[in-house]
Amino acid sequence: MRDWDPKFLITAHSWPRFLYKDGRYDPANPAEGLFQGILLVKAVKLTFTSPSSVDKEDPVMPPGQGKRCRGERRTRMHIAGLLGMKKVAPRAIAYVAVQVSVRNFLA
């Protein structure tokens, strides 16, 4: 894929609908809404932060995340904190997208 081998040609038309915001793909602008699908966003939150973050409307990695509120005690750190993630990297998106795809395929 990295060398653009014709056997593994991936184009914007190859992306699954769950990667798009509201599942809508625009052939005129394939990047519009890409990687903003609710299933993908929730899966990223679940994978790298915590199950409780899935229901919040915050961005995946809000600024100041990891700071404690006054009087709050934490006993465990989420995966993003352990990995030192400050933003969601393309590899993290790809990892979660594959996990969601495989999970939906096997279900």
Image (cartoon, rainbow, N blue to C red):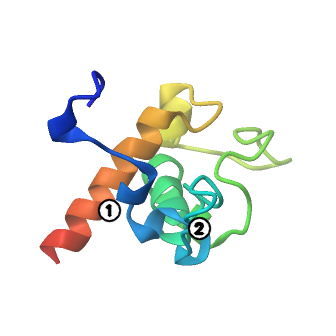
Q: Is residue 64 depicted above or below 32 in this figure?
A: above
- Residue 13 shows which numbered tag? none
**In what element is the residue under mark 1?**
helix
Nearer to me, 82 or 107: 107
- Image position of 54 (left or right of 83): right
- Image position of 82 (left or right of 65): left
- Image position of 28 (left or right of 63): left
Percent coordinates x, y for residue 24 in the rendering? 56, 75
Which callout, 1 or 2, points at the residue further toward the start of the chain?
2
Percent coordinates x, y for residue 30 in the rendering? 56, 56
Nearer to me, 63 or 11: 11
Q: CA distance from mark 1 to mark 2?
A: 22 Å
Instruction: Provide the residue designation for mark 2.
Output: 26
Point out the image quarter for the N terminus: top left
Instruction: Provide the residue designation for mark 1.
Output: 100
Crowding near pointer 2: few (<14 within 10 Å), some, many (20+)? Answer: some
| Residue type beneath disc 1 | Val
Percent coordinates x, y for residue 83 in the rendering? 48, 28
Nearer to me, 4 or 19: 4
